[in-house]
Image (cartoon, rainbow, N blue to C red):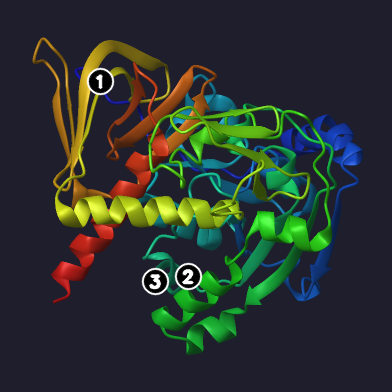
Amino acid sequence: MALPAERPLKTRRPSRLLRALINVICADELKKLDFRCDSHGMEQLRKRPCLYLMNHSGFLDLKIAERIIPCRFNIVATNDAFVGKRGLLSALGCIPTTKFVTDVKLVRQMKYCFDKLHTSVLMYPEAGYSIDGTTTVLPFGLGKCIKLFGVPVVMITTYGDFLYDPLYNGLQQRNVDVYTTMECMLTAEQIDKMTVEEINAEVAKRFDFDNFRQQRQSGTVVAEPFRADHLERVLYKCPCCGTEGRMEGKGDKLICHECHKVYELTELGYMRAVNNVTEIEHIPDWYAWERKCVRKEIESGTYRLDADVNIYVVRGTKAVYDIGRGHLTHTIEGFQLTTPDGELNYVHPAKTSYSVVADFLWYELGDVIGFGDNDKQFYCMPVEPLPVVKARLAAEEIYKILQQKAQL
């Protein structure tokens, strides 16, 4: 933290040459996936700056956006993406921000793109990749920003992207088709007549998706023998015996090493107990059950995370700094991160952010829990294996509880 602050990045128009190069690089991968895009109501918007909202399903998202968006656009990107690539991402028109916290500077930069650069902006409002194939938490201030910008809003929805490369599966890609729909969600005239609440409701309706249900309904087969590898990152709690942290996803099976129950992840994407009763067959329902269990722990006062972690810090764009071993605590009060020498004692109050980062194989190093503010971000990699998504679920539920209490 004693390092001098970097000069702020000036938001630029994206380079046409770089965009063309990216399209060439991505062409083979998208062709392999039989990629297509169904576009509706876009003719009137081709020469107007728009806000493009896109669901965040996998690493293919940006490649898809570069292929289908018909105009120059800036991209809202997380701060750590700029590490070692500051010049490149700036040339691509990327705008840095911090996940899950209020960022007034980001709003100003987006408005600058619309009003001064006359470019569109691409934003993934979920901020993180989908963990269970459904929508992650949307920011509460999104409707207010849309009202402020006053530009048309376009919705891009991907199908098959999550199935192709789900976050939990360790970067193993599957053989599925991928396609998108792109349509004008709200015109500037409609936005002008709507309330913030109505805008938020419309956005939430468009972001209501379930990749595993869509897989089953469309009959999409995922036959790869590794399809359940690392599924315990999402389904960390056994619905049979209630034990946490003893699940293992391997091959096409999910095994509880406590009660020895075995589940199969079928080729159509649902869970089936092997020679036994299936408690929960739909993965998002299993994940929602885990959320309810975390909520009960919080309300009963028994929730607490205590873990030794390796600490990485992102401040600026030169490097990710490894500052060594520390200890992470999470309670209803929030996160506390300390080091044995006492030099670091960072407190992240629960009301600060509506969610936290729970990332798998971060920089191909390991699973992390991440949080911070607009000046620095901490990424905590547990020394002993633990389900990082539980910390994310807990942070989201604690935030909801505090919001509900504040409204009483």
Q: What residue type is labelled 2?
A: Ile
Circle 3/circle 2 CB separation < 8 Å: yes
Circle 3/circle 1 CB separation < 8 Å: no
**In the picture shown, does residue 51 fall above or below 168?**
below
- Looking at this view, name the residue that lies furthest to the bottom: 193
Q: Which of marks 3 and 1 is in front?
A: 3
Residue under label 1: 4
**What's the residue at 34%, 16% (across, down)?**
383
**What's the residue at 10%, 10% (across, down)?**
341
Query: Can I make out residue 103 in this image?
Result: no
Circle 2/circle 1 CB separation < 8 Å: no
In primary-sequence order, the first of circles 3 and 1 is: 1
Q: Which amino acid does label 1 sit on?
A: Pro
Residue under label 2: 146
Residue under label 3: 144
**What's the residue at 43%, 71% (across, down)?**
143
The N terminus is located in which quarter? top left
Kind of element beneath mark 2: helix
- Looking at this view, name the residue that lies furthest to the left: 342
User: What distance separates the C-alpha of mark 2 from that of mark 1?
Assistant: 35 Å
In primary-sequence order, the first of circles 2 and 1 is: 1
